[in-house]
Each structure stands twice: as structure tokens, then as C-alpha cells.
């Protein structure tokens, strides 16, 4: 693997292939019922399956540390994968049932949402020492950090709300009601808008990312779960669990322009470093669908494992 990666970089640098270095990005797919993580390369091939105990769910890639953090709700915390060696190198205890997981903009902190304890634990990523435990709303799930590293946003599923936390002081700045049972959330790269997938009300809440004021509500499919952006933020992709589909929203007009059929029970969704290919983890099907954001069609389906969930930012950038 190591040698092949270096050969790939060599031919790109010297123009032998028409490619760029950002094309080399791996996707880390949690297979919750298999207790594994499937690693998919840019050629849409599984290059390794890594055992991860504790019913893995959440994923976040930390490129600055060459690590991947996997939340394990039945393992009392999260596992640390070396993204070069592709093996687990550490496990960190949080307590309760960890679910959502995200890093800050520099990769120096990792935030872990505890579904049962209604808290977010903050760890530094050098030695994984606990920095702070934050009290949030009921059943925290999806999280996002603003690009300027100023704010942490937390979806409180059972409170139907989004919390905004100041990362300099760790104080709660704001809480805003959204649709019923928000789960996956996404902030755009300009830090202007925050999007929330509301599972029980079948819609997307669009918020001003600075003030959390509500901008719009967009109706989508049955039980929207998670969100990603592609093509420079012009398109928003939403997994609809019970429709086995992905809604595509034009972020300029804030309207749904089409739906794309994927595998059964889609959950996690993330965008490749090329900003064009969108990966969808299909829980019931045990597959990953790869959508081309230009054509809005599935151009590849990859068999992964039982209960493919991949909740979070699961593709290396």
C-alpha cells in the first residue's frame, strides 16, 4: 500500500497521469453489525477491512494526525485508527453511548457526543486526555465545527434543537428549535449556513450559522438522516432512510431538484476530496453507493458489510 501510494504521487507530479493528489482519498465505512470498518480507495475498491469492536457508528478523519476516530456506542468510547497502517492503535473510554464524533478545524481536539448522558466530551488528540465535558440537549447526535474553529454545533435529537457552543470558552451561546428529531447536520465552507436533517418531520432546516436564525424549511423524503455538500456547496445531498433515496437540493434556490435511488436504508453520506463524488452508506443493503454530483447518477455500488452506517465525515481530504 505504502509503495503504491508513492508511485501514484510520482506519476501525478511528473505528468504521466492526468490526476491530482487530492484524488487519493480513502473512505472509512463503519459496518455496525459486523464490528468492522471497510476502507475504500479512490478506485472504489475495498483495500482493507479493519475489526473494530463495540458496534462502530460514527466516523471522522483527522488528516493532520493521519488518524481516524470511530465511535463505539457499545464500547464505551471511540477507537483510533492509523490511516496509513490501517489498524486500530488506541481505544479511548468516554462512558455511556458515544455516537456523533467530529474534530476541530486544526485536528487538535476531538468531540464525542454521548447519546445517553446528554453530554459532549472534548479530548486533545495528542494523548487523548479529556479536556472538558459539556452539557447539551437530550440525545446529542450529529456535530459540526465552523471552518474558523469558533463554534461547535450539536444536534439534540430528543429536544428538536441545535446548540451552538463557543470553542474558546466552552460556553453555550445559543440553542434553536428546528424540525422533529434532528440528526445529521452540515455547515457550508463559508460558515454562512447550517443545515439540519430532521428525521421525524421529513424536512431540512436551514439556519444562519452565526445567529442560528431560521432561514428556510425544505421538505424531503421519508426519515432524512444525514447531509453533505458538493460542487462548491451548490448542491446539498440528503439520505432518506425509508425511501432508499437521496434528495438533491439546490442551495441557491433552496429547493429539491431531484431524488436519486440508492441502496436500502441509506444513512451516512460524505463527499470525496474531488468535491464531485458523493458516497452513501446503505445500512440494510450493506453497500456504498457512489453518486456523481455532475450527472446525479449512481456510477458504482460497493459491497461493504452488515449494517453499513458511516455517520460523519468519513472520507480523508
Image (cartoon, rainbow, N blue to C red):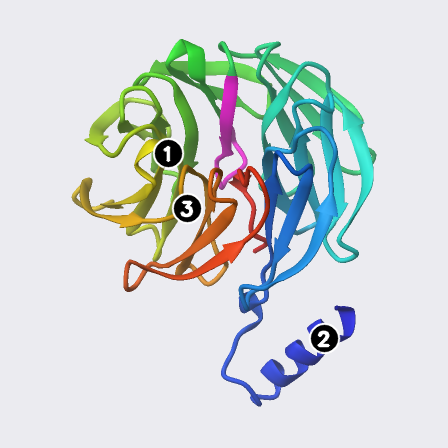
Which badge, 2 or 1, comes first in the chain's sequence? Answer: 2
Q: Nearer the viewer, mark 1 or mark 3?
A: 1
Determine which residue is flagged by label 2: 4
Helix, strand or loop: magenta stretch: strand
Secondary structure type for disc 2: helix
Which badge, 1 or 3, comes first in the chain's sequence? Answer: 3
Is 167 rendered above or below residue 34?
A: above
* Residue at point 66%, 30% (across, down): 55
* Residue at point 22%, 28% (across, down): 215
Secondary structure type for disc 1: helix
Q: Quadrant of residue 176?
A: top left
Q: Position of residue 190 (x, y in %)?
A: 38, 44
Q: Position of residue 167 (x, y in %)?
A: 57, 26
Secondary structure type for disc 3: loop
Determine which residue is flagged by label 3: 189
Tell me if residue 199 is in the magenta stretch.
no
Residue 50 in sight in this render: yes
Q: Pick whichever, 38 or 60, lies toward us.
A: 38
Question: Do residues under tags 1 and 3 come within 8 Å of each other at their CB atoms?
Answer: no
Q: Position of residue 251 (x, y in %)?
A: 24, 45
* Residue at point 75%, 39% (across, down): 80
Which badge, 3 or 2, comes first in the chain's sequence? Answer: 2
Amino acid at each position: 500500500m505504502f509503495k503504491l501510494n508513492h508511485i501514484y504521487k510520482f506519476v501525478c507530479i511528473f505528468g504521466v497521469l492526468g490526476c491530482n493528489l487530492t484524488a487519493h482519498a480513502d473512505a472509512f465505512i463503519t459496518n455496525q453489525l459486523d464490528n468492522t470498518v471497510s476502507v475504500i480507495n479512490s478506485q472504489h475498491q475495498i483495500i482493507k477491512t479493519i475489526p473494530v469492536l463495540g458496534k462502530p457508528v460514527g466516523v471522522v478523519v483527522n488528516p493532520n494526525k493521519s488518524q481516524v476516530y470511530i465511535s463505539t456506542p457499545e464500547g464505551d468510547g471511540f477507537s483510533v485508527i492509523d490511516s496509513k497502517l490501517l489498524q486500530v492503535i488506541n481505544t479511548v473510554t468516554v462512558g455511556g453511548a458515544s455516537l456523533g464524533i467530529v474534530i476541530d478545524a486544526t485536528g487538535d481536539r476531538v468531540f464525542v457526543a454521548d447519546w445517553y448522558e446528554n453530554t459532549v466530551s472534548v479530548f486533545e488528540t495528542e494523548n487523548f486526555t479529556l479536556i472538558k465535558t459539556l452539557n447539551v440537549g437530550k440525545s446529542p447526535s450529529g456535530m459540526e465545527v465552523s471552518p474558523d474553529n469558533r463554534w461547535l454545533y450539536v444536534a439534540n435529537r430528543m429536544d428538536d434543537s441545535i446548540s451552538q457552543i463557543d470553542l474558546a470558552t466552552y460556553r453555550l451561546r445559543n440553542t434553536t428549535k428546528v424540525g422533529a428529531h434532528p440528526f445529521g447536520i452540515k455547515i457550508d465552507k463559508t460558515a454562512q449556513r447550517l443545515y439540519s436533517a430532521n428525521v421525524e418531520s421529513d424536512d431540512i432546516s436551514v439556519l444562519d450559522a452565526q445567529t442560528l436564525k431560521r432561514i428556510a424549511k425544505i421538505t424531503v423524503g421519508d426519515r432524512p438522516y444525514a447531509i453533505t455538500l458538493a460542487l462548491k456547496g451548490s448542491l446539498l445531498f440528503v439520505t432518506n432512510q425509508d425511501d432508499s433515496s437521496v434528495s438533491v437540493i439546490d442551495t441557491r434556490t433552496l429547493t429539491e431538484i431531484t431524488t436519486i435511488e440508492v441502496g436500502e436504508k441509506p444513512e451516512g453520506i460524505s463527499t470525496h476530496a474531488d468535491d464531485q463524488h458523493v458516497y452513501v452508506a446503505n445500512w440494510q443493503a450493506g453497500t456504498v453507493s457512489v453518486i456523481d454530483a455532475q450527472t446525479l447518477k449512481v456510477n458504482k455500488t460497493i459491497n461493504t458489510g452488515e449494517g453499513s452506517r458511516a455517520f460523519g465525515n468519513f472520507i480523508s481530504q
